[in-house]
Amino acid sequence: MQGRSYRYYVSNRLITAGSDLSGLRLPAIPLEQEVARQIVNHLRHAAERHRLLQEVDARAALILKDKALALPFAIEREPQVMLPTMVNRGDIAAGTLTLRLDAAAIATHLVVQPATLDPKLLQVAFTFSLRRRGIETKLIVGDCAPEPDLALLRALADAHKEMARRRAGHRRSDIDGAGGAAGSRMRRRSYLAFLSPRIQQATLAGQVPEGVSPERMLRTDLTLDRSEQEKCLGFDSLFR
Protein backbone atom coordinates (compact mmCIF):
# COMPACT_ATOMS: atom_id res chain seq x y z
CA MET A 1 0.00 0.00 0.00
CA GLN A 2 1.64 3.22 -1.25
CA GLY A 3 5.02 1.48 -1.34
CA ARG A 4 4.76 0.06 2.18
CA SER A 5 4.40 -3.61 3.08
CA TYR A 6 2.14 -4.52 6.00
CA ARG A 7 2.68 -7.88 7.62
CA TYR A 8 -0.78 -7.95 9.21
CA TYR A 9 -3.89 -6.12 8.16
CA VAL A 10 -7.27 -5.35 9.74
CA SER A 11 -10.05 -4.17 7.47
CA ASN A 12 -11.32 -0.71 8.35
CA ARG A 13 -14.78 -1.89 7.29
CA LEU A 14 -14.77 -4.49 10.06
CA ILE A 15 -13.85 -1.83 12.63
CA THR A 16 -16.26 0.91 11.60
CA ALA A 17 -19.22 -1.20 10.49
CA GLY A 18 -19.54 -3.12 13.73
CA SER A 19 -20.53 -6.76 13.60
CA ASP A 20 -20.05 -7.94 10.03
CA LEU A 21 -20.75 -11.58 9.28
CA SER A 22 -19.05 -11.32 5.89
CA GLY A 23 -15.74 -10.41 7.51
CA LEU A 24 -13.23 -13.00 8.72
CA ARG A 25 -10.88 -12.31 11.62
CA LEU A 26 -7.97 -14.73 11.96
CA PRO A 27 -5.28 -14.96 14.68
CA ALA A 28 -2.19 -13.83 12.79
CA ILE A 29 0.64 -15.68 14.55
CA PRO A 30 -1.10 -19.13 14.67
CA LEU A 31 -2.12 -18.68 11.03
CA GLU A 32 1.45 -17.91 9.97
CA GLN A 33 2.74 -20.91 11.92
CA GLU A 34 0.15 -23.18 10.35
CA VAL A 35 0.98 -21.92 6.84
CA ALA A 36 4.63 -22.84 7.45
CA ARG A 37 3.67 -26.27 8.81
CA GLN A 38 1.39 -27.04 5.87
CA ILE A 39 4.02 -26.04 3.31
CA VAL A 40 6.68 -28.11 5.07
CA ASN A 41 4.42 -31.19 5.17
CA HIS A 42 3.38 -30.68 1.55
CA LEU A 43 6.97 -30.49 0.28
CA ARG A 44 8.09 -33.49 2.31
CA HIS A 45 5.14 -35.54 1.10
CA ALA A 46 5.90 -34.64 -2.53
CA ALA A 47 9.62 -35.42 -2.11
CA GLU A 48 9.02 -38.81 -0.50
CA ARG A 49 6.69 -39.82 -3.35
CA HIS A 50 8.81 -38.31 -6.13
CA ARG A 51 6.03 -35.94 -7.14
CA LEU A 52 8.21 -32.94 -7.84
CA LEU A 53 8.47 -32.86 -11.62
CA GLN A 54 6.01 -33.43 -14.42
CA GLU A 55 8.31 -36.09 -15.86
CA VAL A 56 10.33 -38.16 -13.39
CA ASP A 57 13.95 -38.86 -14.27
CA ALA A 58 14.82 -42.08 -12.45
CA ARG A 59 18.55 -41.39 -12.59
CA ALA A 60 18.24 -37.99 -10.94
CA ALA A 61 15.33 -38.86 -8.64
CA LEU A 62 17.41 -39.52 -5.52
CA ILE A 63 19.48 -36.38 -5.90
CA LEU A 64 16.36 -34.31 -6.49
CA LYS A 65 14.69 -35.90 -3.46
CA ASP A 66 17.60 -34.91 -1.20
CA LYS A 67 17.40 -31.32 -2.41
CA ALA A 68 13.63 -31.29 -1.94
CA LEU A 69 13.88 -32.62 1.63
CA ALA A 70 16.45 -29.94 2.49
CA LEU A 71 13.95 -27.21 1.59
CA PRO A 72 11.43 -27.97 4.39
CA PHE A 73 14.27 -27.93 6.93
CA ALA A 74 15.28 -24.48 5.68
CA ILE A 75 11.70 -23.25 6.08
CA GLU A 76 11.52 -24.62 9.64
CA ARG A 77 14.81 -22.93 10.57
CA GLU A 78 13.95 -19.52 9.16
CA PRO A 79 10.21 -19.30 8.42
CA GLN A 80 10.13 -15.49 8.45
CA VAL A 81 12.89 -15.39 5.85
CA MET A 82 11.76 -18.28 3.68
CA LEU A 83 7.97 -17.92 3.61
CA PRO A 84 7.84 -14.52 1.87
CA THR A 85 9.92 -15.94 -0.98
CA MET A 86 8.05 -19.25 -1.16
CA VAL A 87 4.42 -18.08 -1.20
CA ASN A 88 3.26 -16.25 -4.30
CA ARG A 89 -0.39 -15.92 -3.32
CA GLY A 90 -2.85 -16.95 -0.62
CA ASP A 91 -6.63 -17.03 -0.96
CA ILE A 92 -8.75 -17.24 2.20
CA ALA A 93 -12.40 -18.22 2.17
CA ALA A 94 -14.63 -19.30 5.02
CA GLY A 95 -12.99 -22.47 6.31
CA THR A 96 -10.42 -22.82 3.51
CA LEU A 97 -6.97 -21.43 2.75
CA THR A 98 -5.32 -22.04 -0.62
CA LEU A 99 -1.66 -21.18 -1.13
CA ARG A 100 0.07 -20.73 -4.46
CA LEU A 101 3.80 -21.43 -4.15
CA ASP A 102 6.35 -19.50 -6.20
CA ALA A 103 7.61 -21.74 -9.00
CA ALA A 104 10.82 -19.76 -9.53
CA ALA A 105 11.77 -19.92 -5.84
CA ILE A 106 11.22 -23.68 -5.59
CA ALA A 107 12.97 -24.33 -8.90
CA THR A 108 16.00 -22.37 -7.71
CA HIS A 109 16.29 -24.55 -4.58
CA LEU A 110 15.88 -27.74 -6.60
CA VAL A 111 18.17 -26.50 -9.40
CA VAL A 112 15.59 -27.26 -12.11
CA GLN A 113 13.60 -25.20 -14.59
CA PRO A 114 10.28 -23.79 -13.25
CA ALA A 115 8.42 -25.20 -16.26
CA THR A 116 9.43 -28.76 -15.29
CA LEU A 117 7.73 -28.64 -11.88
CA ASP A 118 4.56 -30.64 -11.29
CA PRO A 119 1.67 -28.11 -11.10
CA LYS A 120 0.30 -29.96 -8.06
CA LEU A 121 3.52 -29.16 -6.21
CA LEU A 122 2.74 -25.46 -6.44
CA GLN A 123 -0.61 -25.56 -4.66
CA VAL A 124 -1.29 -26.18 -0.98
CA ALA A 125 -4.84 -26.17 0.38
CA PHE A 126 -6.18 -26.92 3.83
CA THR A 127 -9.36 -26.45 5.81
CA PHE A 128 -9.63 -24.68 9.13
CA SER A 129 -12.15 -23.52 11.68
CA LEU A 130 -12.13 -20.94 14.46
CA ARG A 131 -13.04 -21.90 17.97
CA ARG A 132 -13.55 -19.52 20.87
CA ARG A 133 -12.34 -20.45 24.32
CA GLY A 134 -13.11 -17.59 26.67
CA ILE A 135 -11.35 -14.53 25.22
CA GLU A 136 -9.02 -16.68 23.11
CA THR A 137 -9.64 -17.64 19.49
CA LYS A 138 -8.01 -20.90 18.44
CA LEU A 139 -7.29 -21.91 14.88
CA ILE A 140 -8.27 -25.54 14.31
CA VAL A 141 -6.81 -27.03 11.13
CA GLY A 142 -8.14 -30.14 9.40
CA ASP A 143 -9.16 -33.09 11.51
CA CYS A 144 -6.90 -32.28 14.45
CA ALA A 145 -7.28 -34.34 17.59
CA PRO A 146 -9.29 -32.55 20.28
CA GLU A 147 -7.10 -30.43 22.54
CA PRO A 148 -8.11 -30.19 26.22
CA ASP A 149 -8.61 -26.68 27.62
CA LEU A 150 -5.94 -26.36 30.32
CA ALA A 151 -7.86 -23.64 32.18
CA LEU A 152 -10.90 -25.91 32.44
CA LEU A 153 -8.76 -28.85 33.55
CA ARG A 154 -7.15 -26.75 36.29
CA ALA A 155 -10.56 -25.51 37.45
CA LEU A 156 -11.87 -29.09 37.68
CA ALA A 157 -8.77 -30.27 39.50
CA ASP A 158 -9.04 -27.40 42.00
CA ALA A 159 -12.71 -28.17 42.57
CA HIS A 160 -12.08 -31.85 43.33
CA LYS A 161 -9.09 -30.99 45.52
CA GLU A 162 -11.19 -28.60 47.57
CA MET A 163 -14.04 -31.07 47.97
CA ALA A 164 -11.55 -33.74 49.06
CA ARG A 165 -10.27 -31.41 51.77
CA ARG A 166 -13.79 -30.74 52.96
CA ARG A 167 -14.57 -34.45 53.09
CA ALA A 168 -11.40 -34.85 55.14
CA GLY A 169 -12.84 -32.51 57.77
CA HIS A 170 -11.25 -29.17 56.91
CA ARG A 171 -13.41 -26.19 57.73
CA ARG A 172 -14.50 -23.87 54.95
CA SER A 173 -12.49 -21.02 56.50
CA ASP A 174 -9.35 -23.17 56.31
CA ILE A 175 -9.88 -23.64 52.60
CA ASP A 176 -10.96 -20.13 51.72
CA GLY A 177 -8.16 -18.49 53.65
CA ALA A 178 -8.91 -14.81 54.22
CA GLY A 179 -12.37 -15.16 52.70
CA GLY A 180 -13.84 -12.18 50.84
CA ALA A 181 -14.07 -12.17 47.05
CA ALA A 182 -11.32 -14.76 46.67
CA GLY A 183 -13.04 -17.08 49.13
CA SER A 184 -16.39 -16.66 47.40
CA ARG A 185 -14.78 -17.52 44.07
CA MET A 186 -13.22 -20.66 45.53
CA ARG A 187 -16.57 -21.74 46.94
CA ARG A 188 -18.21 -21.30 43.55
CA ARG A 189 -15.34 -23.12 41.86
CA SER A 190 -15.89 -26.07 44.19
CA TYR A 191 -19.33 -26.50 42.58
CA LEU A 192 -17.58 -27.72 39.42
CA ALA A 193 -16.89 -30.99 41.24
CA PHE A 194 -20.63 -31.68 40.99
CA LEU A 195 -20.77 -31.38 37.22
CA SER A 196 -22.21 -34.26 35.24
CA PRO A 197 -19.64 -37.07 34.83
CA ARG A 198 -20.24 -36.89 31.09
CA ILE A 199 -19.35 -33.16 31.12
CA GLN A 200 -16.17 -33.88 33.06
CA GLN A 201 -15.18 -36.76 30.76
CA ALA A 202 -15.79 -34.63 27.67
CA THR A 203 -13.69 -31.83 29.19
CA LEU A 204 -10.80 -34.22 29.83
CA ALA A 205 -11.05 -35.39 26.22
CA GLY A 206 -11.04 -31.84 24.86
CA GLN A 207 -14.59 -32.12 23.56
CA VAL A 208 -16.00 -28.83 24.84
CA PRO A 209 -18.72 -26.76 23.11
CA GLU A 210 -17.63 -23.41 21.72
CA GLY A 211 -17.68 -20.61 24.29
CA VAL A 212 -17.51 -22.84 27.38
CA SER A 213 -14.88 -21.59 29.84
CA PRO A 214 -14.34 -21.69 33.63
CA GLU A 215 -15.70 -18.13 33.83
CA ARG A 216 -18.91 -19.10 32.03
CA MET A 217 -19.35 -22.13 34.25
CA LEU A 218 -18.90 -20.00 37.37
CA ARG A 219 -21.34 -17.35 36.12
CA THR A 220 -24.01 -19.89 35.25
CA ASP A 221 -26.45 -20.96 37.96
CA LEU A 222 -26.27 -24.72 37.52
CA THR A 223 -28.62 -27.15 39.20
CA LEU A 224 -27.60 -30.59 40.44
CA ASP A 225 -29.70 -32.14 37.69
CA ARG A 226 -27.10 -33.59 35.31
CA SER A 227 -29.25 -33.43 32.19
CA GLU A 228 -30.04 -29.77 32.92
CA GLN A 229 -26.33 -29.02 33.35
CA GLU A 230 -25.54 -30.62 30.00
CA LYS A 231 -28.32 -28.69 28.29
CA CYS A 232 -27.46 -25.36 29.91
CA LEU A 233 -23.77 -25.56 28.91
CA GLY A 234 -24.42 -27.01 25.46
CA PHE A 235 -22.89 -30.44 26.10
CA ASP A 236 -26.17 -32.19 25.31
CA SER A 237 -25.45 -31.84 21.58
CA LEU A 238 -22.31 -33.94 22.04
CA PHE A 239 -24.18 -36.83 23.63
CA ARG A 240 -27.00 -37.29 21.11
Image (tube, helix red, strand yellow):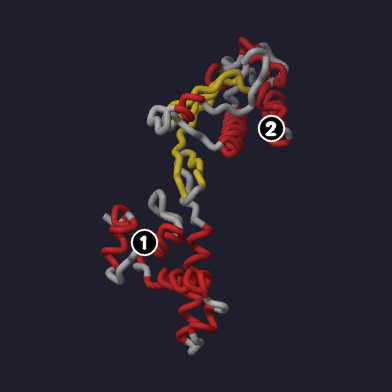
Q: Is residue 225 visible?
A: yes
The residue drawn where x is 64% and y is 13% is 2
Q: Residue 88's spot in the image, x, y percent?
A: 60, 18
The residue lying toward the viewer, choosing from 12 and 60, is 12
The residue lying toward the viewer, choosing from 15 and 3, is 15
Q: The residue tagged with tag 1: helix, strand or loop?
A: loop
179 over 21 or under it: above or below: below
Q: What whole-number distance in Å separates the C-alpha atoms at marks 1 and 2?
A: 43 Å
173 over 62 or under it: above or below: below
The residue lying toward the viewer, choosing from 11 and 151, is 11
221 over 176 or under it: above or below: above
Q: Which residue is mark 2?
A: 79
Q: Residues within 10 Å of mark 1 (few under 14, many from 20)?
A: few
Q: Amino acid at mark 1?
A: Thr
Identify the mark at residue 187; answer none if there is no mark.
none
Q: Which of pointers 1 and 2 lies earlier in the amino acid sequence?
A: 2
Q: Which residue is mark 1?
A: 220
Q: Residues within 10 Å of mark 2 (few under 14, many from 20)?
A: some
113 over 224 or under it: above or below: above
Side (left or right) of 239 relative to 207: left
Asked if the residue under mark 2 is in contact with the one under mark 1, i.e. CB atoms within 8 Å, the reply is: no
Q: Residue 28's spot in the image, x, y percent?
A: 58, 35
The residue drawn where x is 62% and y is 15% is 1
Q: Residue 11's spot in the image, x, y percent?
A: 51, 25
Q: Amino acid at mark 2?
A: Pro
The image quarter in which residue 240 lies: bottom left
